[in-house]
Image: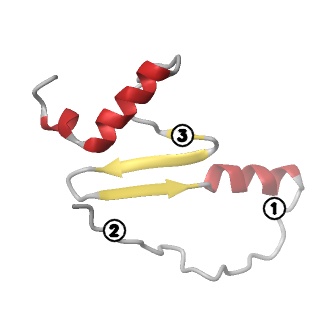
Amino acid sequence: MAGSPLLQTKALRAFCGVLQLFAGKDMGEASVFVGVEISRDRAACILTISQQAAAAALVQKWNMEDAKQRSTPLSLFFQVRVMLT
């Protein structure tokens, strides 16, 4: 893997340095982090994050399944596009 283009990125080299500095291990690509669901489509360059499960748990916890839904300031499928160079 030492010759792979992935290791040549600054971000990955920095991450590897952090793992050497602190007690940690690379557990692969994250699918959930602090309650935020993460999914990636590398081919389409899309990163999706969602807190749908956390929101559903709160609704159930506070017994609000029958409450009226309200819209949010952002549309349901709001997209942020960032060009990485």
Question: What is the three-letter code of the residue carrying label 2?
Answer: Val
The residue that disc 2 covers is 82
- The secondary element bearing badge 1 is classed as loop
- Who comes first in sequence, dot 3 or dot 2? 3
Question: What is the three-letter code of the residue carrying label 3?
Answer: Val
Q: Residue 57's x, y, as percent?
A: 75, 49
Q: Nearer the viewer, mark 3 or mark 1?
A: 3
Q: Residue furthest left?
A: 3
Mark 2, residues whose alpha carbon is within 10 Å: few (<14), some, or many (≥20)?
A: few
Q: Measure how far apart labels 3 and 2 are at the Cα level.
A: 22 Å
Nearer the observer, 18 or 48:
18
Q: Nearer the viewer, mark 3 or mark 2?
A: 2
Q: Nearer the viewer, mark 2 or mark 1?
A: 2
- Give the number of the disc on residue 32: 3
Question: What is the three-letter code of the residue carrying label 1?
Answer: Glu
The residue that disc 1 covers is 65
- Who comes first in sequence, dot 2 or dot 1? 1
Q: Residue furthest right?
A: 62
Q: Residue 1's x, y, as percent?
A: 16, 22
Q: Residue 53's x, y, as percent?
A: 64, 49
